[in-house]
């Protein structure tokens, strides 16, 4: 799967099931509500990968209180996943996962998959941070 050691925020990357499914673990970014937490991320690379991005979702969406993460499915709203013109085969899985980790500390507020988290972030950032930190610490 890879030849070089992983670098933070990537903690692990392994085949999850036969075929083109992977499971990664990423570290929550320092200096925010996700600091110190570890998150499982599931990836499924379709037949058109690397020319189209894999599907990516958090394995435990209840632990990710974030405007760009669906609280039910764990789906992620990230430009490089949703806009074919922004994806490049050169991106690769590791860079994609770094982008997912970066999204945790830099939420997009133009739109969201979790409207409650989006409203909290816009109206009361301290409340958002408290809820996100509490969710991230769940087992």
Image (cartoon, rainbow, N blue to C red):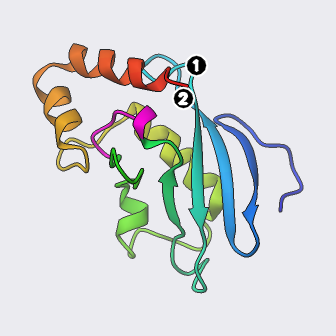
Q: Does label 2 or label 1 sit earlier along the sequence?
A: 2
Q: Is residue 76 magenta?
A: no
Residue 67 part of the magenta-drawn span: yes
Q: Nearer the viewer, residue 59 or 35?
A: 59
Tags 2 and 1 touching, CB below 8 Å = yes
**Image position, residue 127 (x, y; %):** 22, 16
Q: Position of residue 51 (x, y in %)?
A: 56, 81
The secondary structure type at the circle numbered 2 is loop
Does residue 25 appear to the left or right of 32 in the view shown?
Answer: right
Q: Which residues are magenta?
A: 62-68
Residue 36: mark in rendering: 1
Which residue of the protein is positioned furthest toward the bottom in this rendering? 47
Label 2 vs label 1: CA separation? Answer: 6 Å
What residue is disc 2 on? 28
Question: What is the x, y in percent for residue 54?
Answer: 54, 69
Task: Name above or below for residue 39 compared with residue 124.
Answer: below
Query: Residue 85, position in %: x, y?
Result: 38, 75
Of 26 and 58, the residue lying toward us: 58
Q: Residues within 10 Å of mark 1 (few under 14, many from 20)?
A: some
Q: Quadrant of the N terminus?
A: bottom right
Above or below residue 92? Residue 131 is above
The local crowd at label 2, few if under 14, some if 14 to 19, many if 20 or more residues have their Cα within 10 Å, is many
């Amino acid at each position: 799967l890879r030849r070089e050691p992983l670098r933070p925020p990537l903690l692990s990357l392994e085949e999850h099931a036969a075929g083109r499914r992977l499971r990664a673990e990423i570290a929550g970014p320092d200096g925010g509500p996700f600091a110190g937490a570890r998150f499982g991320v599931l990836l499924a690379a379709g037949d058109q990968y690397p020319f189209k991005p894999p599907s990516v979702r958090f394995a435990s969406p209840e632990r990710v209180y974030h405007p760009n993460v669906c609280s039910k499915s764990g789906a992620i709203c990230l430009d490089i996943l949703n806009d074919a013109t922004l994806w490049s085969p050169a991106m690769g899985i590791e860079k994609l996962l770094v982008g997912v980790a970066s999204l945790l500390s830099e939420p997009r507020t133009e739109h969201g998959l979790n409207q409650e988290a989006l409203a909290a972030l816009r109206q009361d950032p301290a409340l958002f941070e408290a809820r996100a930190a509490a969710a991230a610490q769940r087992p």
